[in-house]
Amino acid sequence: MINSLNMSPIKIRKICCIGAGYVGGPTMSVIADRCPELEIRVVDINKERIAAWNDSDLNKLPIFEPGLDQIISRTRGRNLFFSSEMKKSIFGADMIFISVNTPTKTKGLGAGQASDLSWLEASARQVAKYANGHTIVVEKSTLPVRTAQAIKEILNTANRENQKNKISKTFSVLSNPEFLAEGTAIKDLENPDRVLIGGEDPDAVKALVNIYLNWVPRKQIICTNLWSSELSKLAANAFLAQRISSINSISAFCEATGADIQEVATAIGMDKRIGNQFLCAGPGFGGSCFKKDILNLVYLSGYFGLPEVANYWNQVLLLNTWQQDRIYKIVLEKLFGTVGGKNIAILGFSFKANTNDTRESPAIRIASDLLEEGALLSIYDPKVSFKRIREDLEQFSSNNQGTWKMASSIPDALENVDAVLILTAWDEFFGLDWNSLASLMRSPAWIFDTRSVVNRKDIEDTSLNLWKLGEGN
Ligand code: NAD
Ligand code: UGA
């Protein structure tokens, strides 16, 4: 455990970040904003993405995150640069963050559970090849416990080669997992609950601590060993996801018994030991990480001979899929057992509000199931593109009997529908004028509200039927 802070003998001037995605882009933007003396280069193999980061129209940034455009307008071209020039960006860097994707393996040993580390390995090999002098390599991606060992081995092998050729290259590896949530990324980065740094080289740790000290209080910077840092990230995501599965299990209970999930969540959340965060029942968690990180934990538990631990965490995932299936079946049941040829509006396609990200969005599975039953969907989301939705639906379902179209507004989506299914809690879905919207819809029509955005009072004077997740009769 390293807790004392002295000045690090390592002075960081230039940073490179490999991976310009949902983590690399916003994280480096905030570091550039808070540390104007640092020069930061964010590199990516995806040239289209880099072009979008460099677009002069800030509405075309590849990621929608509230507040990101303002930071980019302050920092881009000043001390923050996006490029595809791997060699040049790595060569001059004192510190290199690796922030590449680590999805679940689809093939080979551990397929369906273990993390696919090919992008991470490729990045480490590029660092080994192009780095110069002493370089601190920081794992920003979420990784299986003991991945730092693999990175060290790749870097050290390169180092031995270099020594043969009389080139001097040395490396220190740190783990610095990211805890930002999409939709609040900038707020989370500017005011993190904690920053976690794992590492064995005290000078490298201090160098990274010093960067964060530009805006994060020292007591919120935790320094641990490498393996605790890697495991804490997986464990934090697993705990968060577990809470959602727990409250979702209770939402079904409420519907069966006449209890109300909002009231239950308030009552249990007021217990300080439980706390009131992450108690919103919904259509199941989405996002790129909860599922893959728990799968990874399940895989590692099996690997380390802990089948009971693996089963425990696997149940969190099973419950999540069950919740999505349950919602689809309720829609089917309320619409007299068939949705074939019926018009259904879907409001919200992103996995949560305030992001254009749809990875693992519950909307993909639910919309695909409805399409397979022959439903005619009109989908409205304020930020998700037509292309994104098309790719998601094509990938998920192969047997569509129905069709879908993209709606340009809420009224456009609701025109002549038999039902509307609310799947994301975008601000604009709250407080809608259901009196006037009802006149656009067929009669009788249903609202299926999975995010508690509709107030029952607001539909009292309409002919609409309302089903709310977790609300018993
Ligand atoms: P992402 O897919 O949005 O971005 C990763 C980027 O890395 C892509 O643009 C890809 O082209 C690039 N890349 C891959 N291999 C490369 C290489 N060899 N050289 C250069 N670029 C390369 O992923 P993300 O959402 O930013 O997640 C990155 C990591 O951070 C993952 O491990 C994830 O689990 C973790 N994480 C994500 C979030 C989140 O909210 N998305 C939050 C915390 C942690
Ligand atoms: C999550 C974690 O919150 C971050 O700390 C972590 O860094 C990140 O994963 C990651 O590693 O990728 P994110 O997935 O962006 O962040 O968003 P969350 O706010 O956690 O929401 C995840 C899913 O859970 C969403 O589908 C959301 O709608 C759902 N959710 C969340 C609920 O259904 N109920 C809740 O009470 C909270």
Image: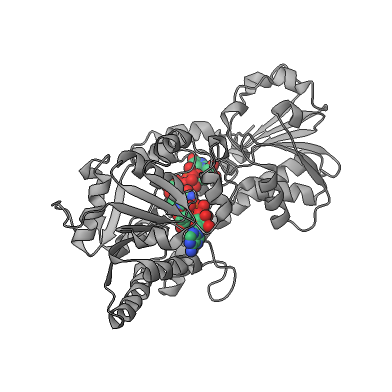
Q: Picture coordinates of residue 243 (x, y %)?
A: 46, 47
**Who's the residue at 50% across and 69% down the image?**
118
Tell me if residue 11 comes above or below residue 147 in the rendering: above
In this view of the protein, which residue sits in the foreground, 126 or 138?
A: 126
Q: Picture coordinates of residue 465 (x, y %)?
A: 73, 28
Residue 439 image-quadrant placement: top right
**Who's the residue at 46% across and 49% down the image?**
82
Q: Residue furthest right?
A: 341
Residue 86 image-quadrant placement: bottom left
**Who's the residue at 24% across and 44% down the image?**
213
Tell me if residue 437 comes above or below residue 245 in the rendering: above
Please give the count of numbered marks on the rendered protein: 0
Residue 469 in sight here = yes
**Who's the residue at 66% across and 47% down the image?**
388
Residue 101 in sight here = no
**Horizontal relation, residue 241 to residue 419: left or right:** left
Q: Residue furthest bottom?
A: 164
Q: Picture coordinates of residue 413 (x, y %)?
A: 74, 32
